[in-house]
Image: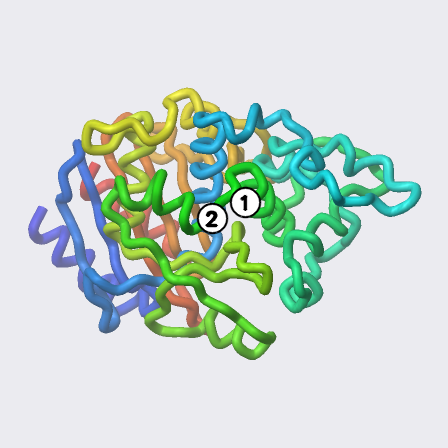
């Protein structure tokens, strides 16, 4: 295996200039950890859409602790002061499950990132896009701006800032440092954050609400702990943080994008004939859990112009070596 690992390190060094770190656990033990491109174990990376899967865990924790009744609860239950536009008849029936499975309907053809993220209230801006004349069809529509509504739901349900709730219920028990708030004042700062080499923290909107679809910075060690929590059915270091029922629901097919099945903000994969699930973010950020092989892999990657996709490296190199 030493020769395989040396070849893996050489491959990453020469061909994957976007990868900043990798952590691999097998049977609950760390068996490989390496850092690249000037990163160290203490450095965090913007994990992009892997943030969505962390939000899924927080929604599950909120349900487990009766802050939220069920994924079938209506979105507008958590926004009693929100007034739908005249003639809007769809938003009233949209559920948390629709947001978690990317089957919520929206009134746009392409995501209006600039409009939402330059607004004074990102949750309100996302709510204004929810619904539409077509109704709830169950069609998969991947929406980063849409899942920001989940952040508003968490804040209103728990009465706590998301970073505080996450620290208390998830991060601190896992030994993950509570992220500082990152404030982005304009589009230029937004793009600067995406390109930042050593970012730390968690982006908040002008109202102080943490992002749901992107914006969280973690290390490979942090991410592999999230994966291990899921692999162990919600238990970490002997303490239950999340119900096994939520994890089972989250990692079973609820919707589908083409040939790719999707759970509750987790992608479902077949690798080597084994059912796996993954949190996948742009630039090559991944948490992969292979329950049958008792394998958890975390990869962090930075956003560069000519990035190389990491999924092939994961499925054809990392998993075969360590599984």
Up-down relation of residue 210 to residue 59 (above or below): below
- Residue corresponding to mark 1: 155
Q: How many marks?
A: 2
Identify the image quadrant of residue 18: bottom left
Furthest-front residue in this view: 159
Q: In which quarter of the image is the C terminus?
A: top left
Image quadrant where residue 239 sits? top left
Crowding at dot 1, Cα within 10 Å, few <14 / some 14-19 / many 20+, comes out as some
The image quadrant that residue 76 belongs to is top right
**Pointer 2: what residue?**
162
Residue at the spot x=47%, y=33% of the render?
A: 62
Residue at image point 43% right, 61% down: 283
Image-based side of 53 in relation to 255, left or right:
left
Q: Marks 1 and 2: in contact by CB < 8 Å? A: yes
User: Tag 1, which secondary structure?
Assistant: helix
SS for dot 2: helix
Q: Please say which color scheme the image uses.
A: rainbow
Could you tell whether 28 is left or right of 247 in the image?
Answer: left
Compute the Cα span from label 2 to label 1. 6 Å
């Amino acid at each position: 295996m030493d020769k395989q690992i040396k070849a893996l390190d050489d491959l990453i060094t020469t061909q994957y200039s976007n990868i900043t770190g990798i952590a691999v656990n097998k049977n609950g033990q760390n068996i490989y950890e390496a850092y690249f491109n000037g990163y160290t174990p203490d450095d965090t990376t913007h994990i992009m859409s892997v943030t969505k899967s962390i939000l899924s865990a927080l929604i599950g924790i909120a349900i487990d602790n009766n802050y939220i009744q069920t994924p079938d609860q209506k979105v507008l239950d958590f926004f009693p002061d929100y007034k739908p536009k005249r003639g809007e008849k769809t938003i009233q029936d949209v559920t948390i499950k629709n947001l978690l499975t990317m089957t919520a309907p929206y009134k746009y053809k392409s995501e209006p990132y600039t409009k939402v993220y330059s607004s004074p209230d990102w949750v309100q801006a996302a709510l204004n896009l929810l619904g539409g004349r077509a109704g709830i069809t169950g069609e998969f529509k991947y929406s980063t701006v849409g899942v920001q509504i989940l952040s508003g739901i968490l804040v209103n349900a728990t009465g706590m800032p998301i970073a505080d709730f996450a620290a208390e219920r998830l991060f601190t028990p896992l030994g993950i440092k509570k992220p500082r708030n990152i404030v982005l004042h304009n589009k230029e700062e937004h793009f600067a954050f995406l390109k930042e080499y050593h970012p730390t923290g968690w982006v908040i909107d002008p109202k102080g609400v943490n992002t749901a679809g992107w914006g969280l910075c973690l290390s490979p060690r942090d991410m592999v702990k999230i994966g291990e929590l899921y692999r162990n059915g919600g238990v970490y270091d002997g303490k239950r943080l999340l119900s096994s029922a939520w994890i089972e629901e989250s990692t079973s097919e609820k919707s589908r994008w083409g040939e790719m099945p999707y759970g509750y903000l987790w992608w479902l994969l077949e690798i080597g004939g084994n059912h796996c699930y993954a949190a996948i973010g742009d630039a090559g950020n991944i948490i992969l859990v292979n329950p049958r092989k008792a394998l958890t892999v975390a990869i962090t990657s930075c956003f560069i112009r000519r990035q190389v996709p990491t999924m092939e490296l994961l499925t054809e190199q990392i998993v075969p070596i360590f599984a």
